[in-house]
Image (tube, rainbow, N blue to C red):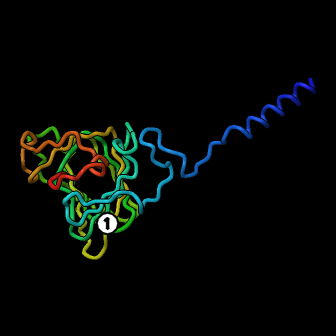
Amino acid sequence: MRRMSGVLVLIFYILSLLLPLPTTTASSCCSIKGLPLVRNISELPQDNYGRGGLSHITLAGSAMHGLKEVEVWLQTFSPGSRTPIHRHSCEEIFVVLKGSGTLYLASSSHEKYPGKPQEYFVFANSTFHIPVNDVHQVWNTNEHEDLQMLVIISRPPVKVFIYEDWFMPHTAAKLKFPYYWDEQCLLEPPKDEL
């Protein structure tokens, strides 16, 4: 029995010399696209997609990283900038990292149009979520500081419906589908997208 244990130790020792141990170095890659598991945010693709005042970085996404259930973004809005009035076929969670602004939310997807939205003040270290198909807009209403948020969405790709105003009928909203933020990092970004 003692001899068998010594042989097993020797086998494991030889295997450890021959087989590389798993590490989290730069050679470790995402399962689908061959991207490093650990990435420097400042080196990730960043764009405004034709929307002045926006800086969007996909930290983890469906097109670039092969995720199927969630996407994670870092978005920064300069003072006065905002999202379009829109809704989408996914849940969305925001974590405000810095700055402040206003969330406009119309929870009336069962009506003919969004209607007058409720206003919510958002601020650093606050969080909020948007239910599926609730029409909303995020606006940096702070005149002096950027609004920076971590954004998590479920079920990419999403169907996005864009509204001209809060009283536009749901049936008239402009559909963008499929919508992948990170796919835009791989292609020339269209300038009229969300």
**Rendering quarter of residue 46:** bottom left
Compared with 79, 6 (above or below) is above
Residue 40 is situated, as x and y percent measured from the top left of the image, at: 46, 59
Pick the quarter of the image with the N terminus. top right
Q: Residue at x 28, y 76 (%)?
A: 144
Residue 63 is situated, as x and y percent measured from the top left of the image, at: 33, 42
Q: Is residue 108 left or right of residue 29?
A: left
In the displayed image of the protein, which residue is found farthest to the bottom?
A: 144
Compared with 188, 172 (above or below) is above
What secondary structure is marked by label 1?
strand
Q: Is residue 92 left or right of residue 53?
A: right
Mark 1 is surrounded, within 10 Å at the Cα level, by few (under 14), some (14 to 19) or many (20 or more) other residues, namely: many
Give the number of marks. Answer: 1
Q: Is residue 7 left or right of residue 32?
A: right
**Rendering quarter of residue 112:** top left
Which amino acid type is shown beneath numbered disc 1?
Answer: Leu
Residue 147 is situated, as x and y percent measured from the top left of the image, at: 31, 66
In the displayed image of the protein, which residue is found farthest to the right?
A: 2
Q: Is residue 155 left or right of residue 88?
A: right
Q: On the image, numbered disc 1 is attached to which residue? A: 147
Q: Is residue 188 visible?
A: yes
Q: Residue at x 32, y 49 (%)?
A: 129
Q: Residue at x 15, y 38 (%)?
A: 110
Nearest the eye: 3 or 179? 3
